[in-house]
Image (cartoon, grey):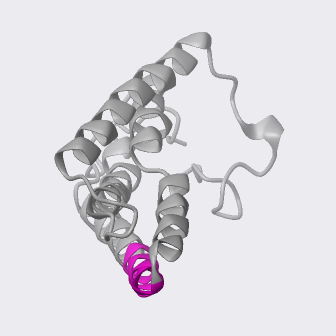
Amino acid sequence: MHNPVGPEGLGASSVADVPPRPLAHLLAVFSGGIVGTALRLLLDTVVPHTDGQFPVSTFVINISGSFVLGVLVSGLWLRNVPSIVKAGIGPGLLGSFTTFSALVLAEVLLVQADPVGAAIAALYLVLSLGLGLGAAFAGLVLGSRLAPSPEVDLDPEFAE
């Protein structure tokens, strides 16, 4: 079977190996980005925090996004899902929903808030990285269990 992530398992082996994507894929990413950003803003509004408080909304967003992307990548995307849907959900929706920049900004604001803020920042960073990796791993495991059985048609993008 063709390795969908290249010979090293980390991505396409060269830029030439990446198939061109039509404008429709760009629009799918853009549309997914609008939805992901709106969901992020909604959660930030529902669960507000000050600069000196643990950023619960950003924490929940990043952990849940890591889990969902893990599930999609390891199992569901092996099914016959059009690449345009993958582009809209992966880099589009989940890419805008979860952001490293929000985590880093929260870290800086916590450290600047007061002496206790530095301790909260350290806790937030450790929990975000640890639980984010754990959630992604759990998503990969769950997704692989949801992967298609051999008799299911695989997405031509990943088939031999």
In the displayed orientation, state which residue is furthest to the front.
114
- The rendered magenta stretch, by its main secondary structure, is classed as helix
- Which of these two is toward me, 87 or 154? 87
In the depicted structure, whether residue 140 falls above or below residue 127: above
**At which x and y percent is residue 14?**
81, 46
Asked whether the viewer can see residue 37, the reply is yes
**Left or right: 22 as drawn, with respect to 107:** right
- Which of these two is toward me, 79 or 100? 100
In the displayed orientation, state which residue is furthest to the top.
23
**At which x and y percent is residue 149?**
25, 52
**Left or right: 139 as drawn, with respect to 112:** left
Residue 23: quarter of image: top right
Q: Exactly how many numbered labels are in the figure?
A: 0
In the depicted structure, whether residue 105 falls above or below residue 158: below
**At which x and y percent is residue 16?**
82, 36
Which residue: 50% across, 38% down? 91
- Which of these two is toward me, 114 or 33? 114
Image quarter where the C terminus lies is top right
Which residue: 32% across, 69% down? 53
**At which x and y percent is residue 37?**
38, 34
Asked whether the viewer can see residue 80, the reply is no
- 95 drawn magenta: no
Which residue: 33% across, 28% down? 35
**Left or right: 128 as drawn, with respect to 23:** left
Q: Which residues are magenta?
A: 115-130
- Which of these two is toward me, 10 or 62? 62
In the depicted structure, whether residue 118 falls above or below residue 151: below
